[in-house]
Amino acid sequence: MTLRLFDTATREEREFAPMNPGKVGIYLCGPTVQSSPHVGHLRSAVAFDVLQRWLERTGYRVTLVRNVTDIDDKTLWKAAEAGVEWWAWALRFEREFQAAYAAVGVKPPAAEPRATGHIPEILAIIARLIDNGHAYEQAGSVYFDVRSFDGYGSLTRQALDDLSPAQDSPVEDKRDPHDFALWKARKDDEPETASWDSPWGPGRPGWHIECSAMAHRYLGEEFDIHGGGLDLRFPHHENEQAQSRAAGYGFAHLWMHSAWVTQSGAKMSKSLGNGLLVSEVLEAHEPAALRLALAAVHYRSMLEYSASTLDEATAQWGRFTGFVARASERVGAVSSAAVAAAELPEAFVDAMDDDLGVPRALAVIHETVRAGNAALTAGDDAAVAAALLSARAMLDVLGLDPAAPEWAGERAGSSDAAMRALDSLVRADIDARAAARAARDWGTADAIRDRLADAGIVIADAADGAKWSLAAEG
RNA sequence: GGUGGAGUGGCCGAGAGGCGAGGCAGCGGCCUGCAAAGCCGUAUACGUGGGUUCGAAUCCCAUCUCCACCUCCA
């Protein structure tokens, strides 16, 4: 079976066929950096990170471009309100987004272009659209002429006459109320640093044009996959596609959209103010657990977030890390090269090939871990080794290999100096408790265990002596 | 009004005509000095009403409820 992906444009799963054998170009709409990231933003990033990892695992070389929209109405407005330069405001949140992505193990993209860094490309594509008769200038702004382009609405099946008018600019300047701004003339109350010279006078890019310009610059006239959150389908992606195709470019072959994180059924969003900030969540939970929680639901299904979501994910993560730690101790650690080369169970491959069926893939991982734990109890080291390799290889595809550098060291077993110091202290307690137990002095033994537990250290007795680990957060 | 999506056991979530995915929580058991971890077992589940079929959570018809996009939004 080969990879099949759901294409928003055709509303069906399509067999993935790259333009160039062995290579995949992906353009992913990144954040508008005007406020702090919430877990919904991370869901989209994690979904496409899993896509990238699966493509890479199955032999593709992936070029993923994720833009940063560092100028828009809200950025200017919010920065002004805060009395900060708009570019400083944008950079502050760009850094927050980068930190959040890194925290949950999202691979850095091949390119991370900013809108304001691509004004020449934006001007070029606008000029091309004017020459083509698909755009027109009006009072220093330039608008896309939706009526001039037959394909308008094809991505999301919208009929122009049924839509509410676009409200990004004064309707009176437009030929059709659905026309949208490619270039916005500078307004008197906007800072001069937020405008650039153009053939139509000083101004700044409209919201959609930057993606067309940057996708063209980094991925060419046509590329394989364009991704983003569900809310971007219309108008953003519809407009992007219209601009690029009207300019004569083939643009994206396949469109993928990730679904919401909801709370009590309602979408989490900046404007609703019900967003759970990444920084808040990570204060109380491990980043890997957050990643697991976000990845565990199919990317096209709503993810219902509640107080128990992270607790459950933490429990599952504990199962994975616990098994990997115990199995590695028993049969020896597996190299990352071996993990990368390991054969994956057929059921796992089938699940991932079926439009990234992570929930089914996770079920295979759980079954593997259970079998591995049973083998550990039975003393079947060959089976333990096989389960360990298989489980780590599958978890690696999801970006959740507990032994990978980004997660190793979160728990006990770290080579970090503080952990070594702690280990030496805890060992003294473990020895004292062992002595008490040998003397059948259960009261003393339990008191030691309780005291360590209060400090967040979990003691587990095993056949070959007691082991300690840090309790899971949350 | 237009477009798209969803209703599955206490909870989260797969599946999409026929052996009840998986996880979390719960309950029973094994193991343990007691625990923890682990293992084994454990469920009148598929919004409602009809219909098709030997058989439907899965197909058809009707109906209710919820959500999203069409304004910034992952």
Image (cartoon, coloured by chain):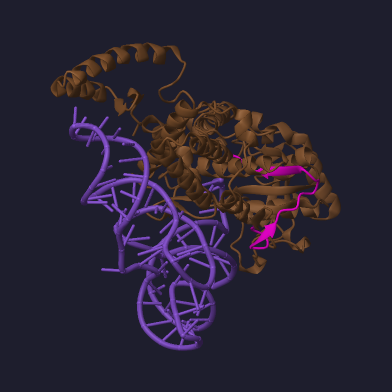
The x and y percentages for residue A300 are 54, 54
Please identify the quarter of the rendering in which residue B19 is found. bottom left
Query: Which quarter shows the N terminus of chain A?
Result: bottom right
Residue A433 vs A142, above or below: the answer is above
The x and y percentages for residue A144 are 73, 53
The x and y percentages for residue A131 are 86, 50
Report the span colored magenta.
Answer: A7-32
* Foreground residue among A327 and A98: A327
- As drawn, is A146 to the left or to the right of A446? right
* Foreground residue among A264 and A102: A102
Please identify the quarter of the rendering in which residue A156 is found. bottom right
Q: Residue at x 35, y 11 (%)?
A: A424
In this rendering, does residue A29 appear at all?
A: no
Asked whether A29 falls inside the magenta stretch, the response is yes
Q: Residue at x 45, y 33 (%)?
A: A287
Q: Which color was chain A given? A: brown
Residue A266 vs A59, above or below: the answer is below
Q: Residue furthest right?
A: A131
Asked whether A183 falls inside the magenta stretch, the response is no
User: Which lettered chain is shown in purple?
Assistant: B
Query: Which quarter shows the C terminus of chain A?
Result: top left
